[in-house]
Amino acid sequence: MIPLHALTPDGVRIRGFPRNPRSLLVPILSFLTENHDSRFRHGLLPGYTAAPMASTLDTRTRILSAADVRAVLSMKAAVEAVESAFADHARGLAHMPAKVYLSLSEHAGDFRAMPSYVAEHAGHPASAGVKWVNSHPDNPKRHGLPSVMGVYILSDPATALPLAVMDATVLTAARTGAAAAVASKHLARPDAKTIGFVGSGVQARWMLDAHRTIFGDRLAVLAADIDPAAASTFAGECGGRAVSVEEASGCDIVCASTPGRGPAVMRAWVRPGCHVNAMGADAPGKQELDAGILRDAIVVIDEHYQATHSGEVNVPLARGELREDHIFGTLGDVIAGKKRPERTAAALTVFDSTGLAVQDVALARVLFEEARARDVGTLVALVG
Ligand SMILES: NC(=O)c1ccc[n+]([C@@H]2O[C@H](COP(=O)([O-])OP(=O)(O)OC[C@H]3O[C@@H](n4cnc5c(N)ncnc54)[C@H](O)[C@@H]3O)[C@@H](O)[C@H]2O)c1
């Protein structure tokens, strides 16, 4: 029998037991059919006794530090999670409001809030969460901190319990690297032999790791940076060669990840058949590519609102150097088979990435499941 105290939302008290029990039917039925608020169903509000299911719920939150996230992260799993997240979004299985920007020019940076939900499908449980992340390009030089740092809250969509709070600095870099690799898988020429990095910072390293899960070690690495020492360090770490931005731009696959506000990669430097992952432009006014590259390329974006607002296409569109109808479609459309770009040997392709919240929630869920299975992290009674 349903206990009365579990059926009485705030302010509606049923006192005593009515003489005619049938009079209870109306409030009970209306509660069951109309009240979708899981707080009542799981008895988690003050004054409400737990409903039967609640006794089996572990209400603690798993806290995962950057070291914990690294311990449970597999780049192969990240690439798979991100690839299906793009396709899920294209198939309408996700809710993803556009990211919210909090620009702080006085602190030379910005914050972004990125919520999303992916419905249960194909054996994956429903997932919801939000990322709080920043971009402060001067951080490495000024404070010895990464340019991009984040925290992720993964919640159970059914109960709203916070399942995990985790470092999203590693998560962001891993899902960004994975997105570039997935784009190269679907858009680059299959016989690609060289990969060039314009910007040899944090994202470049993760992009290379992710590409290696798909292309193996067969891609020769050319690293470039406005700071030659950064290019040399990266090249030394990965067995590549430090080169000029022009030389890196001549590779079969080019990964740009700079915080630039003007073209770093020029049209004349890019060879026929090249695929460019434009990862750095993720806020209004940011730009890495000469608009001529976009005009001559099949341009694939991650999401229309975000790309036109803050992606690589945002500046050329605003200046009238590119037409919106030149955008071919989204990477999710391509992965889901809804759109098929004609990749001739000489065609140029560009993936314009702003970073999608569905990438984060998909990877956060994978990390959480792995951490739970291996009991990594710390369990905390975070919410009352
Ligand atoms: N698309 C996404 O999903 C996504 C995700 C994370 C970060 N980002 C963006 O990627 C960019 C890079 O992030 P990061 O974490 O690698 O930063 P980082 O500071 O670690 O590395 C950036 C590198 O670019 C170099 N650089 C700057 N201007 C350059 C130029 N004109 N030519 C060549 N090199 C240049 C810097 O010297 C630095 O080494 C940022 O703009 C960030 O906002 C995008």
Image: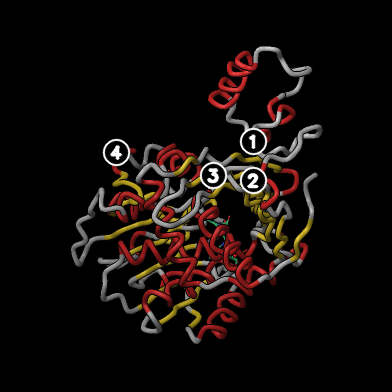
Task: Identify which residue is drawn at 80% across, 34% down.
Answer: 46
Q: Residues within 10 Å of mark 4 (few under 14, many from 20)?
A: few
- 43 is higher (above) or lower (below) than 70: above
4 or 3: mark nearer the eye: 3
Position in image of residue 160 (x %, y %): 64, 43
- 288 is higher (above) or lower (below) than 12: below
Q: Quadrant of the C terminus?
A: top right
Instruction: From the image, tell me which residue sits under label 4.
Output: 325
Asked if disc 1 and disc 3 are in contact, CB closer than 8 Å, the reply is no
Asked if disc 2 and disc 1 are in contact, CB closer than 8 Å, the reply is yes
Position in image of residue 243 (x %, y %): 47, 78
Q: Nearer the viewer, residue 74 or 2?
A: 2
Q: Nearer the viewer, residue 362 or 37?
A: 37
Q: Amino acid at mark 3?
A: Ser
Q: Quadrant of the N terminus?
A: top right
Asked if disc 3 and disc 2 are in contact, CB closer than 8 Å, the reply is no
Question: CB at mark 2 closer than 8 A to ligand 1?
Answer: no
Instruction: From the image, tell me which residue sits under label 2.
Output: 53
Instruction: From the image, tell me which residue sits under label 1.
Output: 41
Question: CB at mark 1 closer than 8 A to ligand 1?
Answer: no
Rounded to the nearest angstrom, the CA distance separating label 4 from label 1 is 48 Å
Q: Nearer the viewer, residue 230 or 311?
A: 311
Q: Residues within 10 Å of mark 3 (few under 14, many from 20)?
A: many
Q: Secondary structure at mark 1?
A: helix
Task: Identify which residue is drawn at 71% across, 24% down.
Answer: 9
N-terminal of the pair, mark 2 or mark 1, is 1
